């Protein structure tokens, strides 16, 4: 039975010609409206574009239904022009809670950003980063020498986190992944699973000699000296998936190597 009632649809496309062509066809077929007049947003592109749209409509209550006109499309549904209204009516809702990043740079400036996938700290040049890791105000690792470290949400656990050999987290789990990127010392540390209420602070040691940037999804702050990360409890994004192809199902499938 239909579980959603959407009267108006806005179509947004990435700059890729294939996505733009799909947008024009769908708008002609389904009488697309402006985003501020829409009950639901249909995003046409790849995962990167989907993240941009999710950020744009954070906390608006507008659900986002992605259709893949990009490459990977992990966050997207399959593209099809026929039967879109019926697919939207039957789509399953997933609520995404982003991370909040507060990064302080070497000039003492504070920068805030949200991350749906992950917050990453990355070395800026040839020398490895040297970091101190605190969880809820307690030092858990006095010195980590590495290419970087990241904090991933369940939604982002199959992205950069997985490439860095971090754990895959089911979407409904109240957990965050703290994953080192190419750790040199301690060499055997592979990261930690943290409760989603954890407050994570990372100090950059020898910041002048070993500069580090902080990235929240696509927002980058360079030459940071301290980064604070926690779940943004007051923020949420809404995603729609076809039945049987939810983010939960995709994450579970990913754990079996598909």
Image (cartoon, rainbow, N blue to C red):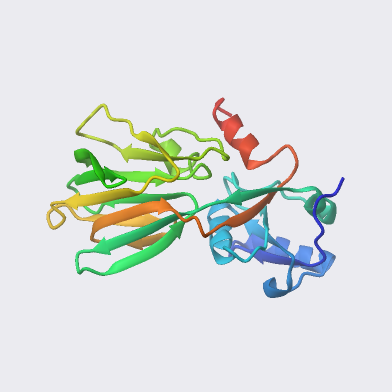
Number of numbered discs? 0
Could one spot residue 68 in this view of the protein? Answer: no
Residue 123 located left or right of residue 50: left
Vertical order, 102 against 79 (above or below):
below
In terms of depth relative to the viewer, which is nearer, 201 or 33? 201
Q: Quadrant of residue 10?
A: bottom right
Q: Quadrant of residue 27?
A: bottom right
> Which residue occupies the extreme right position in the image?
1
Q: Position of residue 53 (x, y in %)?
A: 58, 62
Q: Position of residue 60 (x, y in %)?
A: 62, 66
Vertical order, 106 against 92 (above or below):
below
Residue 13 located left or right of residue 121: right
Could one spot residue 53 in this view of the protein? Answer: yes
Q: Where is the C terminus found, in terms of image quarters?
A: top right
Residue 202 located left or right of residue 244: left
In terms of depth relative to the viewer, which is nearer, 17 or 108? 108
Q: Position of residue 130 (x, y in %)?
A: 18, 45
Q: Where is the N terminus found, in terms of image quarters?
A: top right
Vertical order, 183 against 222 (above or below):
above
In terms of depth relative to the viewer, which is nearer, 182 or 229? 229
Q: What residue sits 75% from the left and 73% below the top?
A: 33
Q: What residue sits 16% from the left and 55% below the top?
A: 207
Residue 135 located left or right of residue 71: left
Q: Position of residue 182 (x, y in %)?
A: 29, 37
């Amino acid at each position: 039975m239909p579980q959603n009632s959407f009267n108006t649809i806005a179509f947004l496309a990435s700059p890729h010609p294939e996505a733009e062509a799909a947008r024009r066809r769908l708008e002609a077929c389904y009488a697309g409206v402006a985003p501020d007049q829409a009950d639901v947003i249909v995003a046409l592109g790849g995962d990167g574009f989907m993240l941009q749209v999710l950020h744009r409509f954070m906390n608006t209550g507008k659900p986002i239904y992605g259709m893949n006109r990009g490459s990977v499309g992990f966050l997207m549904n399959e593209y099809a022009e026929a039967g879109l209204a019926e697919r939207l009516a039957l789509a399953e809702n997933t609520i995404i809670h982003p991370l909040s990043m507060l990064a302080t740079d070497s000039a003492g400036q504070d920068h805030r950003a949200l991350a749906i996938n992950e917050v990453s700290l990355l070395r800026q040049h040839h020398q490895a980063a040297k970091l101190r890791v605190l969880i809820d105000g307690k030092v858990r690792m006095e010195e980590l020498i590495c290419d970087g470290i990241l904090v991933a949400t369940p939604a982002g656990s199959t992205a950069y986190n997985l490439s860095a050999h971090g754990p895959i987290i089911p979407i409904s789990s109240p957990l965050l992944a703290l994953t080192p990127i190419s750790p040199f010392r301690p060499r055997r540390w592979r990261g930690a699973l943290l409760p989603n209420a954890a407050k994570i602070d990372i100090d950059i040691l020898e910041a002048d000699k070993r500069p580090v940037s902080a990235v929240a999804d696509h927002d980058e702050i360079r030459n940071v000296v301290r980064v604070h990360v926690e779940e943004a409890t007051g923020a949420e994004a809404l995603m729609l998936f076809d039945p049987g192809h939810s983010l939960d199902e995709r994450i579970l499938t990913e754990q079996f190597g598909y």
